[in-house]
Amino acid sequence: MMLVALIVVAFLALIPLVLWPSVTAGRAGKLLAALSIVVLPVVAGLVGLSTHMERAKTVSFCISCHVMERYGQSLHVDDIGHIPATHYQYNRVPRETACYTCHTDYTMFGDYNSKLRGLHHVWVQYLGTIPDKLHLYTPYRNRECLHCHEGGRSFLDAVTHKSEPGRFAQIRNESLSCVSKECHGTTHDVTKLGDFPVWPPDAHKVETHP
Amino acid sequence: MTTTQLEKRLRSAAVLVMLGLAIELVSLCWQHPTSFIFFVTLGGLSMAAGILMYLHAIVSRGA
């Protein structure tokens, strides 16, 4: 709301310059021109960019593209083996930003890298060929899992993690992927959505992959 | 640069910035990746062009 007000104020401040540009002859007019053409629009643009970046983190934003709908539906699969669904349903990630929380890079410019990947998605959506089966551009890194799980008791005390010496080192140095088939490999298995009930029960019906 | 030319450029700059602001406003009402693209490309470029035109106009005036 504040941003809308800011844009409206910036817009209104420009009207005198369009209708009567001669007002810039005076000192007050020059100040108005600098304020309304540079300062207010730059502030409005930066706040707008920040707002768009925050909105781009929400699940509703991610699944607003048709091709991502089934991935959003997979968060409602009632099966504890589905890692994204479990994280979403048990609040292991913020529900509003579930996609972003797991799919951003936890690095210095991770936010911007993930947005660049998003721009690539849009490019493919409009100008490329959408593949039948979607893949990540790069293999999923353990770093993103360990950002939250490292040091946690569920991670450190897990029987399978302690079953072999060196397993923790393998996980930390990325030589054994958390989402490998024999570990937590059931991620967004959208081809089998129709095989599972949904949670919560009143969630929209999960459609079978055509 | 004459005063009339300067005023014309200021008017054009103001119109470009207004266009950019209008695009930003519309993009905020639409939650979709395409709206982000509109905001950054059309809105951002329009505002940047308006600001640069304004700065160029006042620098040229001083020269």
Image (spheres, helix red, strand yellow):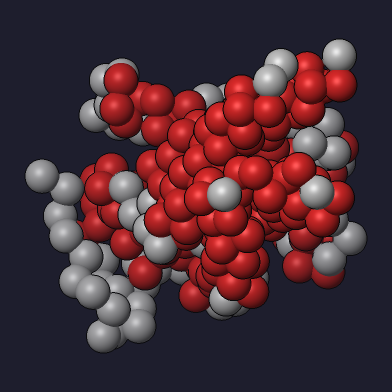
Query: Is residue A19 in view?
Result: yes
Please tell me whether residue A148 is drawn above or below residue B4 in the rendered image.
below
The residue drawn where x is 84% and y is 66% is A152
Camera-side residue of A70 and B23: B23
In the rendered view, would you say B42 is above or below A67? above
User: Which corner quadrant holds the C terminus of chain B?
Assistant: top right
| Quarter-of-image position of residue B52 | top right
Nearer to the camera, A1 or A79: A1
Residue found 76% across the figure and 67% down from its top = A154
What residue is drawn where x is 47% and y is 34%? B42
Q: Is residue A166 visible?
A: no
Q: Is residue A195 left or right of residue B6?
A: left
The number of numbered discs placed on residues in the rendered structure image is 0
Residue A159's spot in the image, x, y percent? 73, 60
- The quadrant of the rendering that contains the N terminus of chain B is top right
Q: Position of residue A146 (x, y in %)?
A: 78, 50
The answer to which image quadrant residue A134 occupies is top left
The residue lying toward the viewer, choosing from A111 and A30, is A30
Residue drawn 83% across and 31% down?
Answer: A173
How far across and how far down the image is residue A101, in percent?
A: 64, 56
Left or right of A46 in this view: A150: right
Residue B53, image x, y percentages: 65, 26
Q: Closer to the camera, A173 or A157?
A: A173
